[in-house]
Image (cartoon, rainbow, N blue to C red):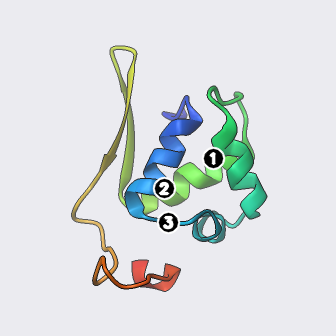
Amino acid sequence: MRKVTDARQLKSGRVILGLTVEEMAKLANIHKNSVLRVERFTTLPLHTFAADRIQKALETLGIRFEIKDGQVGVFFSASTKRAKTPYKKRTIETFF
């Protein structure tokens, strides 16, 4: 069952990690236009291939999506490997 009901959750996860649209697309193995298209939705359709790929990529990097009492949340696990320094221009490779 998908825990993401609103595309703003996906965009929030991407922003929390400091990823660009291009980096998100590469991690999710989809085109950058697909990322932009998904992020425009406020309610996601039942089956959205691109949204599912984005969610999986974000969860791999430590983002958690939760729904509790009708409220949605986006959380980041600090134990996930991140870029070595937040002040350096990062590339996707710094996440791995």
| Rendered image quadrant of residue 45 | top right
Q: CA distance from mark 1 to mark 2?
A: 14 Å
Kindly identify the residue that appears in the image at 44 percent across and 61 percent down: 60
Residue 70 placement (x, y as % from top left):
39, 15
* Residue shown at the point (30%, 73%) measured from the top left: 81
Residue at figure coordinates x 75%, y 53% from the top left = 34
Of the two numbered discs 2 and 3 on the same chain, state the one appearing first in sequence.
Answer: 2
Asked which secondary structure carries label 1, the reply is helix
**Residue on which disc 3 sits:** 19
Q: Which residue is mark 2?
A: 14
Q: Position of residue 56 (x, y in %)?
A: 54, 54
Label whose residue precedes the other's in the sequence (3 or 1): 3
Hey, what amino acid is under mark 3?
Leu
| Amino acid type at mark 1 | Asp
Crowd class of label 1 (few under 14; some 14 to 19; many from 20; radius 10 Å) = some
Residue furthest left as drawn: 79
Q: Which residue is mark 1?
A: 52
